[in-house]
Amino acid sequence: MFRLVIKPDQRRLAAGSAADPVAARRQLVLGTAAAALGALQAPARASLLAQRPAPANGQKADPNHEQVVAQKDPPTGTSSRARAPVPPAASTPPEEAQPVIQTLQLAGARLEVQFAPGLDKRLRRLALAWVRRSAQTVAGYFGRFPVARVEILMVPVDGAGVRAGTTFGEPELSIRLRLGRSTRQAQLRDDWILVHEMVHLALPRVAPAHNWLHEGVATYVESVARARAGWLAPATVWRGWMAAMPQGQPQAGDAGLDHTPTWGRTYWGGAIFCLRADVQMLTRSAGRAGLRQALQGVLAAGGHFGVAWPVDRILASADAAVGQTTMTDLYQQMKASPQPTDLDALWRSLGVMDTGFDEAAPLAAVRRAILS
């Protein structure tokens, strides 16, 4: 994962790098503005569908949380910088040598999809359908798309698959994706990165200490939203969580979520927080309201990635939407204390087993409600 922090003087550079603001955005498509502002490296997150080794124990996630990026780790399972954009080959057909811009109006939002030179007509067609499907999936979870307008910038790289994604808050809300020229339809169908990035749009920006909340919500909701839309089978989601969530448990020297910015605690510690909150809210409301309704409340209160809020305001808005104090109370427990979670007991109570589901488990109805 990369992060980009734009300081005031750099912000002017991004906004004023071309007299024409549209031309400035084209620089972002080509990656030049991001390069000028200095992208920073942080550990990658493994896909739920393709579990790979996490970074070394104790490795820190980047604490700067103005912009959010997800990157697939390479075949070796190690973290690395995303590949640089590849310029169009000399033999590129004329129709592929210029940027192509297409606009989608859906779920109450305008999505401007910008294709950098070098992405052929076949891949542009597949990618546009992928963007539409991802946006509909995210809108299905939140009740609407999180923001009224976003630019989605696609830059070609060698190879196949979605290589990395970045969500920018400035100069305008945008998501930049590095897309392999040889990407196949099945790879876009199985991709998690774009949904993950779009989920980031639904939360206000937070202080570095609370990065785990942003990444935890995106990690957890990405799987839930895709399952609700029929992209993933429930068994796939729960098996993936059983395998991955132990990486979010506190290790020796842990000082709580706010003070332990390791890869595991940032992503999967945040996801554990979300799962515990979801289970508690659904249990207390007899299945009527959980994390989905709480996060919808943040949107309804005016929260999104285009604004910065204190973490207490985000949690209070979420709690108010469901008439509880679950998220605030859980945060008080986990922010400055290791607070390990008995995941084995939680799986048993939800009826999650390696071989399937136990529908007689005490919280089986809650398990079903999470993905419905």
Image (spheres, helix red, strand yellow):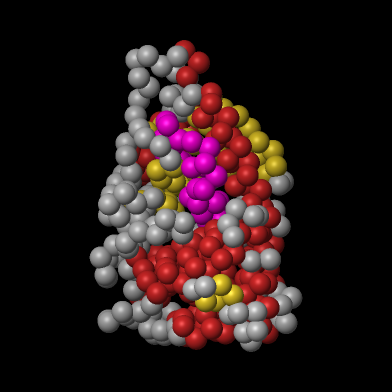
Left or right placement of residue 10 versus residue 169 in this view: left
The picture quadrant where one finds residue 156 is: top left
Which residue is more in the foreground, 29 or 287? Answer: 287
Which residue is more in the foreground, 131 or 199? Answer: 131
Residue 163 visible in rendering: yes
Q: Is residue 30 above or below residue 189?
A: above
Which residue is pictured at 29% across the width and 62% down the height?
A: 55
The answer to if 315 sits in the magenta stretch is no
x and y, in percent, of residue 138 in the image? 62, 53
Left or right placement of residue 313 versus residue 44 in this view: right
Which residue is more in the foreground, 239 or 9? Answer: 239
Which residue is pictured at 63% across the width and 32% down the height?
A: 103
The picture quadrant where one finds residue 158 is: top left
Which residue is pictured at 37% across the width and 14% down the height?
A: 91
x and y, in percent, of residue 31 in the image? 38, 35
Which range is magenta?
Answer: 176-200
On-image quarter of the C terminus: bottom right
Which residue is pictured at 44% across the width and 47% down the height?
A: 166
Q: Is residue 191 above or below residue 23?
A: below
Q: Is residue 296 above or below residue 121?
A: below
Residue 174 visible in rendering: no
